[in-house]
Image (spheres, rainbow, N blue to C red):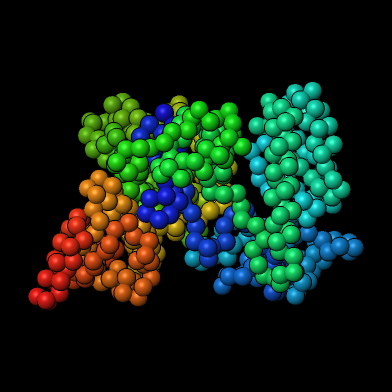
Amino acid sequence: MKSAGISNAGGQLRIALMNKGKLVEWRTQAEASEALSGDIYYGKVAKVVPGIQSAFIDIGYDQQAFLYVDEAAPISGKKAGRSISAYVREGESLLVQVIKEGTETKAPRVTARVSLQGRLLVYLPAEGLGAGEEPVSVSRKIRNECARERLTTLMSSLLEKGEGVIVRTEAAEADEEQLRREWAYLRGRWRDAWQAVQGKKAPCRLLLDDSLIEAALRDFLADGAEEVIVEDAALFREVGKLMEAMFPEELPKLRWHRQKEPLFAQWGVREQLALALQRQVPLAGGGNIVIDRTEALTVIDVNTGAFSGRGGQQREQAVTAANLEAADEIARQLRLRDIGGMIIVDFINMREEKNRERVFKALESALKADPVPVSVLGMTSLGLVEMTRKRTRASLAERLTEPCPCCEGGGRMLKIEECFRYLREDLEALAKVQDAEAALVELSDRLFEYWQNGQADGSAWPVTLYVRKAEELSGGRYRILYAGSRQEAERLWLSHAKNS
């Protein structure tokens, strides 16, 4: 059973997609200082580099965005050529949309052809419609000619000069009212954003991509989520209103999590996230897969692990079974970890061609559930499977961890902000389950320094917090020594202060 969970416990909006108890995808509300895929900016051309057919766009962050010639729009009134200089000029302002988020080492990539994603439609304002491009484009997966003609006629009647629309596959069975409602919503959203930016100087953000909840609901419901479980009453009402407006037929799937145990604690999300940050992933059959990321590509190695057969046909069967299990887990890990770019998989060697083909087909089948485009290119002469996965978001490791200062980036550790979110989540649970009003907490040097500098907002904590440093704790570790009455927490804290 597939379940979507939405929670703001820990002070951050977080959304999980579970399938049969396993975490499949994890989305979190990003920091305001990050340029996210789909966000639209009114940027300024900082530099044009004809040598690499690219331009660098200042969108208001330390990292300048990268605009390649194929993603640029021609200058009004000037015939476009293949040189980037024919498309953009240094110092001019233009609208761009993030199509690939930046990483610790690479700048975000942008396009000058902006669009607004909906469930049924993709809205193309004048800035997003290419020269000579048809204003109405219907998904090729809609093969019924009558349906295509109906959709083209309807959308053509709604377009104003310069606008364009892409009709998505999900619109095939939609009625006219649904299409009109979504079209009005997308157009209104664009116009409101454009109006708000008038008079402002570049660089500035024009429009955030779909709200995290809206985008997740659109993707997860299309993926077959059978229930949407929401924690917190106010958030439940917000999600209900959104589903009533955008996904009315899915409203019966909405549930309110009223139990005292936090939703994601009940699902074991934190433990599964911790495993998703490790190199080695165990398989139920005793084997494992090892995932190593480099700057150029990701390498995945499959191992038999606990297999102790005697060889021959027994070995071939065991190896094939391990590879089949690994194929399914690899597809899940790629999606959960948000791994993009080139990927090489080294399955355990199989002697029989039919078994190699069976594993290859199993991998292709498992990857079909991934909403991000994945291309499986085949097997090399060395028996390695080659594939690519489109990269749009920062990986899970980049979102949750940071380079370790002790080993100069050779390892990674949980981000300080994430550590405090975990602590806040634990304290919220104690406040709910034990009616705690205060807590005494020990923090590692790293966390204590962050706390002392006032970077962990003390006013937003669910309980009154008494904090002390523990030399024996390292990295991002903390320890809750007491949770209960404010008087007792303060007494314990003062007692320790006197003795230290």
Rendered residue at 72%/34% (across/down): 179
Q: Give above or below for 472 relative to 169.
A: below
The quadrant where residue 488 appears: bottom left
The x, y position of residue 149, in whole percent, is 81, 28
Q: Give above or below for 356 relative to 34.
A: above
Residue 356 versus residue 270: which sits nearer the camera?
270
Residue 293 in view, yes or no: no
> What is the count of numbered marks?
0
The x, y position of residue 152, in whole percent, is 81, 33
The x, y position of residue 193, in whole percent, is 69, 57
Quadrant holding the N terminus = top left
Residue 86 versus residue 213: which sits nearer the camera?
213
In the image, is 115 to the left or to the right of 30? right
Rendered residue at 35%/43% (across/down): 264
Quadrant holding the C terminus = bottom left
The extreme left residue here reads 499
Residue 404 in view, yes or no: yes
The quadrant where residue 62 appears: bottom right
Q: Give above or below for 97 relative to 361.
A: below
In the image, is 333 to the left or to the right of 158? left
Rendered residue at 74%/36% (across/down): 180
Rendered residue at 80%/36% (across/down): 155
Residue 414 versus residue 206: which sits nearer the camera?
206
The x, y position of residue 480, in whole percent, is 21, 58
Q: Give above or below for 444 relative to 352.
A: below
In the image, is 484 to the left or to the right of 432? left
